[in-house]
Image: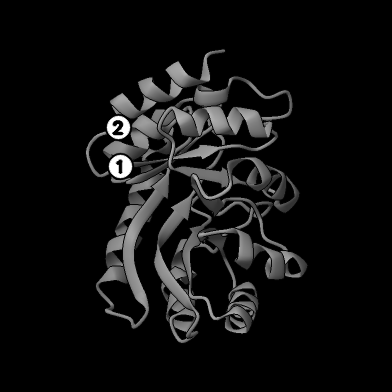
């Protein structure tokens, strides 16, 4: 598996204005470094422990985005490590991020995670509650809401994800039109290795790609 060639290929396929997040779940720091040397500027991590290990090798050569489910007791470390948290889905976790950022004098860019499939077993706010949640989070002084993120349900055919991506794009426009303080709605993070091309067609400008860059993982798809 040639990580450098994979990164070069993926970057060449992305339209202007679309940014790549290299999803580095379970990957070794040397693999992440190789991706960075090939042109990756944003690394997505699901777990704090893995992110800390990676940071020891990559330093400040790339921005770190948190793309996993963030537990409240991990927020203190997370706000120091990451340049963006893509998975804010409740006022409780947003409040904890706000409190911990205040302690270190930081404003944290965040994305609101949308459960576009309305799946009970998954994280994320249901679409019909997203505007209300964003309005409440906009009142927190140490957070800047910069957009939305969705995964969509796990479906065999990426084409079947279009309705979920479209609804999230519509929400993105709707919330942007509210002109809330501290809400800029710059990023729409949708699509992974199997679905990023469809996601881009539906308006994504941030795509989270792991397997296409690093090869298959043994546990699950990225």
Residue visible at 28% across and 69% down? 176
Q: Which of the two residues, 210 or 79, is positioned nearer the viewer here?
A: 79
| Circle 2 residue | 14
Q: Which of the two residues, 42 or 90, is positioned nearer the viewer here?
A: 42
Q: Residue furthest left?
A: 16
Query: Above or below — where is 20 with respect to 86?
Result: above
Query: Above or below — where is 78 with respect to 37?
Result: below
| Circle 1 residue | 18
- Residue 170 falls in which quadrant of the image? bottom left
Residue visible at 52% across and 43% down? 43
Q: Quadrant where the C terminus lies?
A: top right
Residue visible at 54% across and 64% down? 125
The reply to whether dot 2 and dot 1 touch (C-beta < 8 Å) is yes
The figure's colour scheme reads one colour
Q: Secondary structure at mark 1?
A: loop
Q: Position of residue 3 (x, y in %)?
A: 52, 20
- Tell whether 47 sits left or right of 111: right
Q: How many marks?
A: 2
Q: Which of the two residues, 181 or 44, is positioned nearer the viewer here?
A: 44
Query: Above or below — where is 221 with respect to 165?
Result: above
Answer few, some or many: residues within 10 Å of disc 2's Cα (few below 14, many 20 plus, some between 14 and 19): some
Q: Position of residue 179 (x, y in %)?
A: 27, 79
Q: Position of residue 48 (x, y in %)?
A: 71, 53
Distance between the Cα atoms at labels 2 and 1? 6 Å
Q: Secondary structure at mark 2?
A: loop
In this orientation, does residue 133 appear? yes
Q: Quadrant where the N terminus lies?
A: top right
In this orientation, does residue 222 appear? no
Q: Which of the two residues, 9 or 104, is positioned nearer the viewer here?
A: 104
Label of residue 175 in the image: none
């Amino acid at each position: 598996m040639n990580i450098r060639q994979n990164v070069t290929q993926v970057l060449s396929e992305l339209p202007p204005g679309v940014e790549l997040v290299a999803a580095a779940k379970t990957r070794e720091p040397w693999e992440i470094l190789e991706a960075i040397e090939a042109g990756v500027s944003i690394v997505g991590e699901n777990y704090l422990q893995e992110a800390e290990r990676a940071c020891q090798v990559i330093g400040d050569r790339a921005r770190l985005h948190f793309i996993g489910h963030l537990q409240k007791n991990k927020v203190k470390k997370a706000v120091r490590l990451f340049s963006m948290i893509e998975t804010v889905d409740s006022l409780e976790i947003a409040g904890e991020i706000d409190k911990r950022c205040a302690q270190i004098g930081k404003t944290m860019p965040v994305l609101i995670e949308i459960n576009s499939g309305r799946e009970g077993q998954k994280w994320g706010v249901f679409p019909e509650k997203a505007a209300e949640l964003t309005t409440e989070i906009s009142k927190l002084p140490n957070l800047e809401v910069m957009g939305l993120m969705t995964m969509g349900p796990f479906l065999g055919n990426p084409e079947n994800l279009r309705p979920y991506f479209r609804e999230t794009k519509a929400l993105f426009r709707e919330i942007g039109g509210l002109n809330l303080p501290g809400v800029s709605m710059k990023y729409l993070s949708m699509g992974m290795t199997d679905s990023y091309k469809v996601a881009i067609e539906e308006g994504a400008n941030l795509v989270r790609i792991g397997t296409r860059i690093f090869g298959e993982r043994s546990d699950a798809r990225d």
